[in-house]
Image (cartoon, grey):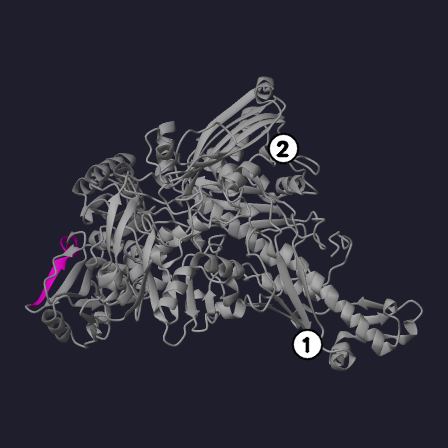
């Protein structure tokens, strides 16, 4: 389809309105069905059995005692899956490390983190399965764990994977190593840049491993049938990914698997990978019964993918007038037990919002004995942004400059090059900075022990593949079907775009999320891509439906197709045929059986790029100097949405990302003991913010249209979590006079720092 | 093997509850269940017998008179802190009760559960001790009264013997110029467990001099502890910087916490002093205002 912004001056009638989300009533009344709400007659309960060690060779597993427990119907280990070889070289950005993925489901040679599953049991009840799991006997060879970047890089560090070499650019690494990959971006002349600088600021920064903290634990129901086909019901961001990944890891033909996604209680990237489904399928096959698996909260924390902990070093050089001239950045990210941290994305995003002519960026992907990381909302970008925005704040202080002005002075604009190469198209960075500066919060006076912090950030957003089908009902209403689970209100956005094109009220469009057999391929709900890419497929399919409607009307009015225009839900005769009048969609629909049959159209898209989203956050907080406890007083998110389809859900994304980022900044962290055991695998001691911890987060939607989308849409889901780490840290600096280089800024750390500063 | 089956009984008289608890080893009292059920989920296993005490009239009765409060052990937290008279007579105790768990939990959680769970970080316990509360215990040998400050003997340990349960609490009426306060430190604003808790009850004379004081700390020792040196520092003068800082120093010195995921020893000791000062100030203002 034409992707030009042909509607830039269009007056929208449905877009920009705020209908109630289609899943809303079921969710507030508790009727919505999530992953754990599905069952089948005769379903067994499946549980994983998990490693008590963070790093140990598996010498032998004896499941015989467990198998003899009455009520146990199947026990599996890695031996029950067809072995997929490990690859010690990256499969590339589009590739899949199947060997590693399979070993995340069930450990094969080694347990690589505390809680790493090595067996699974299906039994009549969960209690029996758990009890039988305890009877599985394992001979372990316990190895010393590697629990931090520093430990992984130490000269005598235990090596997680024999045969692991360092790929990529950067300084050469000899022999087997825990560094899987090095990424380098360079531009200009770094030494000359720093020599040219009037002022240099530098610092080392550290962030802990953190979890997405979605409320709904992973859950699935799998039925392997006698005919070789399988059905899966599960909570996932990407049902098509569940299908192909479950097939690959179990050696199954993917076309025999149908995946039906449930409603989803949060994902943030963490529900793109599979954990349960391949094991449940293997158990179901072995037992000849459906198998349901539901993680406990503790298992979610121990056994699913959080995002990386990091150590970073950054040096920034500027002229005395504030112009940035040089940046030297090193990012070391924990990947967890296999390659694949988001350090590459962090290398790409961290410095790209600013024009810096001379730079060097080195990112290293480092394996440690912790759960293998998964995507988490703008993966990697918040971590790098914490370092960059902290030092920009230092620079503004040293130069006596307003922090927004300093960013405005150095902000990237259309035509500017990102640090990883490409030029930015139209972007709204300066507009967001200006809107933040103009907001009343920015002028609100602060009192004692209070501080204000500013930070900015960006995320690429994704395109990827999407499909949509639109059909017209006999009463002139419509159904729009896609394959993207609705996390942030995307059903409403799909309905709005379909209604806008058809020229009918959004209440007359029913959106639905199909299973993998009922709709064309859709990549996951992730990458802030659904409203953008799937929305384009919806618009395209709807426009095809309109062509059908026009053709039917031309027949009914007996005029040439060229003489029919579509206006506000009516086929209108024009071009000299205007005496023929018009026909509303209801009349065309009622007669479609007689004019050519049902009207249905499908479309697919695969946009190679998306419109980047820039955001600016302003955090006002207060610190209790006697206890180190801080409270966020006011918080502002300004972000370029390109075009807000459903403003309430755009604002919701802004607020949700900010809330998660504030939690990351202030209290969230995995706590590990010396042996690598997670000490806080629950929401009591893994402290995400509760509602009363946060003020109502203020939002401003800036709209600089994205030319790649017909309405100008940019993804909005991920950018909001990029700036908060820096914004909160800069507010803390303003309130206390202390620069925090390590997250989280929990009360004991803050009090320690304040006492150190005395 | 099959899933263990627990028996469930809901007697309507104290004697029947005592008999059930005495007869079945490992039987557990169920009032709110907000600790018991969580412990089961965390792998403690189901007890062989649940004795639900909420149908015993004496355990859900509330009686308030000039002697003070006599309240059934199964009265939920929300019913306590929503009682205007209780709030005005023991505002600190009401505050502490309002901090247990979350709003939903408070519809079920009880003082007796908070006490018998014997967590060093229980919020209601320091406040109950500050107010001089007594637990009435029923058992095979009849009833006995145990001061709340003597009730807990260590983490998870109490003076209760087999067949015994807490049936009531008695809280003596405060003097004319007396009041209390409870503060706790948590990293969040709610739904958390005290890093440190401090309950202070003060009685003043007509001139505003502190006549008597009770200072109690939670989460800094195996049980909630009174701090006699802090109490002594507060008595004998109107509340001033000198007595407050002496009380804070006494609390910091008395605190004997552990390093754990919720706080370090140094942090907890320091906060024990800070919260003692702050709670004392609040209690003093309230006592003056009465």
- Relative depth, front residue between A366 and A638: A366
Q: Name the residue furthest left.
A: B141
Tell me if residue A385 comes above or below residue B92 in the rendering. above
Q: Which residues are magenta?
A: B142-152
**Viewer-nearest of discs 1 and 2:** 1
Percent position (x, y) of residue A199? 56, 21
Q: Residues within 10 Å of mark 1 (few under 14, many from 20)?
A: some
Tell me if residue A21 comes above or below residue A381 in the rendering. below
Examine the image and state in which quarter residue A415 appears. Answer: top right
Tell me if residue A570 comes above or below residue A95 in the rendering. below
- Relative depth, front residue between A194 and A361: A361
Q: Chain of mark 1?
A: A
Q: In the image, is A758 to the left or to the right of B138? A: right
**Label 1 SS:** loop
The answer, for residue B207, to whether it is visible in the render is no
The answer, for residue B229, to whether it is visible in the render is yes
Q: How many marks?
A: 2
Whichever of callouts 1 and 2 sits on the residue coming sooner in the sequence is: 2
**Residue placed under numbered mark 1 in the picture:** A473
**Label 2 SS:** helix
Residue B51 among those drawn in magenta? no
The answer to whether the residues at label 1 and label 2 have Cβ atoms under 8 Å apart is no
Residue displayed at 67% across by 43% down: A428
Q: Are marks 1 and 2 on the same chain?
A: yes
Percent position (x, y) of residue A213? 43, 53
- Relative depth, front residue between A703 and A105: A105
Residue B150 among those drawn in magenta? yes
Residue displayed at 94% across by 69% down: A576
Q: In the image, is A265 to the left or to the right of A477? A: left
Q: Residues within 10 Å of mark 2 (few under 14, many from 20)?
A: some
**Residue placed under numbered mark 2 in the picture:** A405
């Amino acid at each position: 389809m034409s992707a030009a912004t042909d509607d830039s001056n269009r007056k929208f009638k449905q877009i920009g309105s705020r209908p109630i989300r289609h899943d809303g009533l079921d969710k507030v009344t508790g009727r919505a069905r999530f992953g754990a709400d599905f069952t089948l007659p005769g379903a067994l309960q499946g549980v994983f059995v998990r490693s008590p060690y963070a790093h140990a060779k598996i010498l032998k597993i004896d499941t015989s005692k467990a198998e003899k427990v009455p009520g146990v119907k199947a026990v599996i280990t890695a031996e029950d899956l067809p072995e997929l070889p490990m690859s010690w070289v990256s499969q590339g950005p589009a590739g899949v490390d199947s060997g590693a993925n399979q070993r995340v489901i069930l450990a094969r040679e080694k347990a690589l983190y505390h809680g790493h599953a090595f067996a699974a049991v299906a039994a009549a009840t969960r209690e029996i399965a758990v009890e039988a799991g305890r009877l599985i006997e394992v001979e372990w060879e316990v190895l010393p764990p590697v629990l931090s970047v520093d430990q992984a890089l130490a000269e005598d560090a235990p090596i997680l994977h024999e045969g692991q070499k360092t790929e990529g650019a950067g300084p050469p690494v000899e022999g087997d190593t825990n560094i899987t990959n090095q990424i380098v971006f360079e531009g200009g002349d770094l030494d000359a840049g720093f020599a040219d600088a009037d002022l240099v600021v530098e610092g080392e920064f550290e962030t802990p491993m953190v979890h997405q903290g979605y409320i709904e634990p992973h859950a699935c129901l799998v039925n392997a049938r006698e005919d070789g086909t399988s059905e899966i019901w599960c909570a996932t961001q990407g049902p098509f990914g569940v299908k192909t990944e479950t097939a690959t890891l179990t050696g199954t033909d993917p076309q025999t698997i149908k995946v039906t996604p449930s409603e989803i209680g949060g994902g943030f990237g963490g529900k793109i990978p599979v954990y349960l489904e391949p094991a449940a399928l293997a158990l179901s096959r072995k037992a000849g019964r459906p198998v349901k698996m539901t993680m406990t909260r503790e298992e979610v924390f121990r056994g699913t993918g959080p995002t990386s902990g990091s150590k970073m070093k950054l040096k920034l050089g500027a002229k005395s007038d504030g112009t940035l001239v040089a940046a030297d950045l090193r990012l070391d990210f924990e990947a967890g037990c296999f390659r694949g941290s988001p350090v590459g994305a962090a290398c790409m995003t961290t410095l790209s919002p600013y024009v810096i002519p001379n730079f060097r960026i080195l990112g290293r992907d480092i394996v440690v004995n912790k759960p293998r990381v998964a995507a988490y909302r703008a993966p990697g970008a918040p971590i790098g942004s914490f370092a960059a925005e902290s030092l920009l704040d230092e620079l503004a202080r040293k130069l006596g400059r307003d922090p927004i002005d300093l960013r405005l002075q150095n902000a990237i604009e259309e035509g500017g090059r990102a640090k990883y190469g490409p030029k930015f198209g139209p972007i709204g960075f300066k507009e967001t900075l200006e809107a933040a500066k103009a907001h009343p919060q920015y002028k609100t006076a602060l009192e004692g022990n209070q501080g204000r912090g500013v930070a900015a950030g960006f995320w690429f957003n994704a395109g990827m593949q999407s499909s949509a089908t639109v059909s017209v009902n006999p009463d002139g209403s419509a159904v729009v079907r896609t394959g993207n689970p609705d996390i942030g209100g995307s059903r409403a956005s799909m309905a709005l775009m379909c209604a806008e094109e058809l020229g009918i009220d959004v209440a007359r469009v029913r959106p639905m999320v199909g299973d993998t057999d009922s709709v064309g391929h859709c990549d996951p709900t992730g990458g802030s891509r659904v409203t953008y890419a799937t929305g384009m497929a919806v618009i395209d399919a709807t426009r095809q439906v309109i062509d059908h409607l026009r053709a039917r009307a031309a027949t009914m009015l007996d005029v040439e197709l060229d003489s029919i225009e579509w206006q506000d839900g009516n086929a209108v005769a024009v071009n000299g045929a205007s005496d023929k009048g018009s026909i509303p969609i209801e009349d065309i629909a009622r007669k479609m059986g007689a004019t050519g049959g049902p009207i249905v159209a499908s479309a697919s898209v695969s946009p190679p790029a998306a419109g980047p989203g820039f955001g600016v956050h302003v955090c006002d907080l207060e610190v209790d100097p006697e206890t180190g406890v801080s409270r966020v007083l006011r918080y502002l998110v300004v972000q370029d949405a390109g075009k807000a389809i459903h403003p309430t859900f755009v604002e919701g994304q802004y607020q949700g990302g900010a809330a998660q980022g504030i939690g990351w900044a202030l209290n969230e962290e995995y706590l590990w003991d010396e042996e690598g055991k997670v000490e806080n695998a629950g929401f009591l001691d893994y402290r995400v913010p509760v509602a009363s911890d946060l003020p109502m987060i203020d939002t401003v939607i800036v709209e600089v249209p994205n030319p790649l989308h017909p309405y100008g849409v940019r993804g909005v889901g991920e950018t909001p979590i990029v700036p908060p780490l820096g914004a909160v840290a800069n507010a803390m600096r303003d309130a206390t006079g202390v620069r925090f280089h390590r997250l989280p800024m929990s009360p004991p750390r803050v009090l320690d720092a304040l006492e150190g500063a005395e | 093997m099959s899933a263990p089956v627990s028996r469930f009984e809901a007697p309507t008289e104290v004697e029947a509850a005592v008999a059930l608890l005495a007869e079945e080893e490992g039987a557990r009292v169920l009032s709110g269940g907000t600790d018991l059920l969580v412990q089961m989920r965390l792998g403690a296993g189901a007890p062989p017998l649940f004795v639900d005490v909420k149908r015993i009239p004496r355990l859900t009765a509330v009686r308030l008179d000039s002697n003070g409060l006599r309240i059934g052990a199964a009265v939920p937290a929300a019913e306590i802190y929503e009682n205007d008279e209780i709030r005005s007579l023991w505002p600190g105790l009401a505050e502490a009760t309002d901090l247990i768990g979350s709003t939903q939990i408070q519809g079920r959680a009880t003082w007796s559960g908070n006490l018998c769970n014997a967590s060093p970080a229980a919020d209601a316990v320091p406040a109950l001790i500050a107010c001089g509360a007594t637990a009435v215990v029923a058992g095979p040998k009849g009833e006995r009264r145990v001061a709340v400050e003597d009730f807990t003997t260590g983490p998870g340990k109490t003076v209760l013997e087999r067949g015994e349960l807490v049936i009531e609490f008695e809280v003596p009426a405060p003097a004319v110029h007396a009041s209390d306060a409870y503060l706790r430190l948590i990293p969040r604003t709610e739904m958390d467990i005290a890093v440190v808790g401090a309950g202070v009850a003060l009685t003043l004379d007509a001139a505003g001099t502190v006549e008597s004081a009770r200072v109690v700390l939670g989460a800094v020792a195996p049980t909630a502890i009174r701090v006699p040196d802090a109490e002594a520092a507060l008595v004998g003068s109107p509340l001033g910087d000198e007595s407050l800082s002496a009380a804070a120093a006494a609390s910091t010195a008395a605190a004997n916490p552990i390093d754990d995921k919720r706080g370090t020893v140094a942090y907890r000791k320091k906060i024990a002093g800070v919260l003692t000062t702050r709670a004392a100030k609040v209690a003093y203002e309230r006592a003056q205002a009465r």
